[in-house]
Image (cartoon, helix red, strand yellow):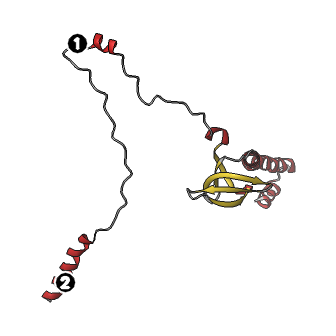
Amino acid sequence: MLNFLLEEAANTGGSPLITIGMLLLVVVGFYFLLIRPEKKREKQAQAMRSALQVGDEVTTIGGIIGKVVSIKDETFVLETTKERTHIRFLVSAIRSVDVKAEESVRPRTTAPAQKAAPKKEDTKKEAPAEETPAEAPVEAPVEAPAEETFAPAAEEPVAEAAAEEAAES
């Protein structure tokens, strides 16, 4: 591309200052469009990696999500799954910090389990004597879904149909 511009400038009899000016303009354009934004991204990634703390939830460049258990120089140990599998990674393998350690430790607030029962005096004033106050709905306990099992009864009709077809032919 540069040779083409130089040849065109020489053929048209243009000033070499214009050609040099155009080349400088292209270099400055590349700097602002490509080089500067990439350096900015690298600086942000380095700041994120240097601010890594034990307890942060991170995603690696391989897509593994877990909680940081320990950090040593250029490596860290990531805890994944409920079985607490520990995997050691380079700090440069971090794609993003999903939850910071301060955010994951939230103070527990005590939510009232049930509303306080109204006083008997209040119920007498609110409801007439012949009506009874409505009871609060009781929520049924949530049970875990049962594991799926394969029923052999579902397979027997298929086997019987195959046996019948074989007997007919």
In the foreground, 128 or 145: 128
In the foreground, 57 or 123: 123
Label 2 sits on residue: 163
Please tell me the numbered disc located at residue 97.
none
Q: Secondary structure at mark 2?
A: helix
Please tell me which residue is depicted at 24% across the width and 71% down the height of the picture: 153
Please tell me which residue is depicted at 66% across the width and 56% down the height of the picture: 78
Quadrant of the drawing holding the N terminus:
bottom right
Of discs 1 and 2, which sits in the foreground?
1
Please tell me the numbered disc located at residue 128.
1
Quadrant of the drawing holding the C terminus:
bottom left
Residue lying furthest top: 125
- Residue 38, given in percent of the width and then of the height, sits at 73, 49
Please tell me which residue is depicted at 28% across the width and 26% down the height of the picture: 135
- Residue 39, given in percent of the width and then of the height, sits at 77, 48
Q: What amino acid is at disc 1?
A: Pro
Q: Secondary structure at mark 1?
A: loop
Q: Taking 26 as reference, is 164 above or below it?
A: below
Q: What amino acid is at disc 2?
A: Ala
Q: Are marks 1 and 2 in contact (CB under 8 Å)?
A: no
